[in-house]
Image: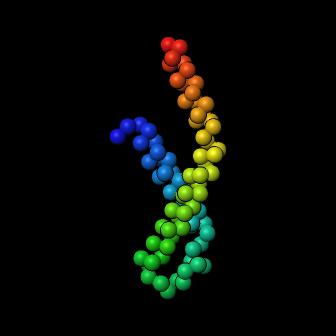
Amino acid sequence: MDLATGLSYGYFLMCLILGWMATAILKDEVLIKQSSSPAKRFLFRLGIALVLAEGFRVFLSFILGPFLDELVNRSIQSFIGF
């Protein structure tokens, strides 16, 4: 596994953790009854976390993307000058 693949998996994992935490804050018990099985509640929470993770991924890409492009461009330019 190369560095880019590892970073993209790490980025997705970070967004998934943010989505999971946001799901906990939303109190999904309001959306699904307490009497349902724990497996259903877990799957429901996982589904919401995946949707929120995708939203965080898109949002953070717009925020962090230009900064990372500039950082990589400067690194490449300094390497070419070397």
Locate residue 76, reporting x and y percent: 52, 23
Up the image or down, 20 lies above or below 36; here it is: above
- Name which residue lies at 44% across and 82% down: 37
User: Residue 55 is drawn in which quadrant?
Assistant: bottom right
- Name which residue lies at 55% across and 30% down: 72
Looking at this view, is 27 or 70 the one in front?
70
Up the image or down, 28 lies above or below 22; here it is: below
Q: Which residue is outermost to the top? A: 82
- Name which residue lies at 58% across and 35% down: 68
Q: Is residue 34 shown to the viewer in this render? A: yes
Q: Which residue is outermost to the bottom? A: 35
Locate residue 17, reporting x and y percent: 51, 56
Locate residue 61, reporting x and y percent: 59, 46
User: Residue 40 is drawn in which quadrant?
Assistant: bottom left
Q: Is residue 21 shown to the viewer in this render? A: no
Up the image or down, 9 lies above or below 27; here it is: above
Q: Which residue is outermost to the left? A: 1
Looking at this view, is 43 or 70 the one in front?
70
Locate residue 66, reporting x and y percent: 63, 37
